[in-house]
Amino acid sequence: MDEKLLKILAKVNYPGMERDIVDFHMIEKAEISSDGEVNILIKNITDQEKFNTIKEQILSLVKEAGLGEKCNVELKKASPPGQAPKPGVKISKLLSNIKHVIAVGSGKGGVGKSTVAVNLAIATAKKGYSVGLLDADILGPSIPTMMGTEDEQPFADEQKKIMPIENHGIKMMSIGYFVEKNMPVIWRGPLVVGALKQFMTDVRWPDLDYLFIDLPPGTGDVQLTLTQEAKIDGVVIVTTPQKVAYIDAIKGIVMFKRLEIPIIGIIENMSYFQCPDTGKKHHIFGKGGGELVSKEYDVPLIGQIPIDGSITEHGDSGHPIVDSLPDSAITKAYMEAVDNLVKGGNDRS
């Protein structure tokens, strides 16, 4: 893809929308040949009038920019809509374009699992990988708030596929984009599982290196559905140092091992507080919980994230700390965790 052309195409909004055709992943090809000919191929449009409108805008902008003597704008013919999977066919085939699907889970709530998932995803993207984030915590979605996308509304393409929301370099989806703000999701298990399946099958996830799935806490229907029907390449378990947390983390480890899902490692969140004046570490919630579980259950401890009020502050404002404070000790801890995660994930692939 030619970067100059992409910048021009980013000025072309999809008719009737405020988002551009680059953001909606409608560009199949954007090239300038050696003889100065511009060739652009548009995809995911079935309405000829809308394509004609887009084409006119592109031709005008390319001419205005003086790029190429001739400009060809063509529409890629849409393939027939795919059929629903037959009984017994795993949904994992629908995620085949994603190299690594990583679930982030915890045995109990209150350990900062979603905060870890968000910052882990951003840290992975900063390593140069293409990354997505699926908020599977249907009853308590928090990803839109932490990613600063609370007011976003998903868009469906011409094939009725939902386009992911994007911010901080992450493609994401959450039930939070579909329910009224501050309204609780009061659903029974089957509805929750149905929503999760829809996010796996009806969202047009692009080619990604990593898709992180933020699981609800515990060991219930969502976890079972994912492991039975989706392609899960590994799990990261989040815990805190105190006993009440790592006992529940063990339950998660045992469950995933029984389901034969690889456990990439443990992240010990709120591991310690480092005094800014002296640099001394204070273990507010105890010490050694993550290491204890790691040794007893032969699971790597891939990260220890310090506790700091700025983590909550940045998450609440929609600017996760890994993105806002790239040189902080917290960000460095997440970067190290990603290095260990990538190594662990590749060792299992």
Image: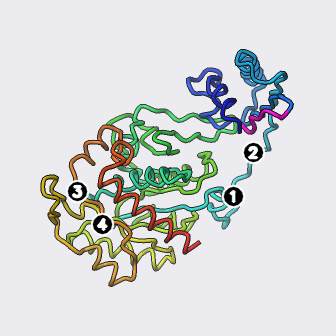
Q: Is residue 291 above or below residue 119?
A: below
Mark before the other along the chain sequence, 3 or 1? 1
- The residue singled out by tag 2 in the image is 81
Mark before the other along the chain sequence, 2 or 3? 2
Residue 304, position as x, y percentages in the image: 30, 65
Q: Which of the two residues, 138 or 18, is positioned nearer the viewer here?
A: 18
Q: Secondary structure at mark 1?
A: loop
Which residue in the rendered view is the most extreme toward the right?
35
Q: Judge whether residue 215 is colored magenta.
A: no
> What's the residue at 46%, 67% (across, down)?
235
Is residue 255 toward the left or the right of residue 63 in the image? Answer: left
Q: Would residue 304 be visible to someone looking at this image?
A: yes
Q: Secondary structure at mark 2?
A: loop
> What's the residue at 32%, 71% (across, down)?
249
Dot 2 alpha-carbon crowd within 10 angstroms: few under 14, some 14 to 19, many 20 or more: few
- The residue singled out by tag 3 in the image is 307
User: Which label sits in the foreground, 2 or 3?
Assistant: 3
Contact between labelled residues 1 and 3, with CB atoms less than 8 Å apart:
no
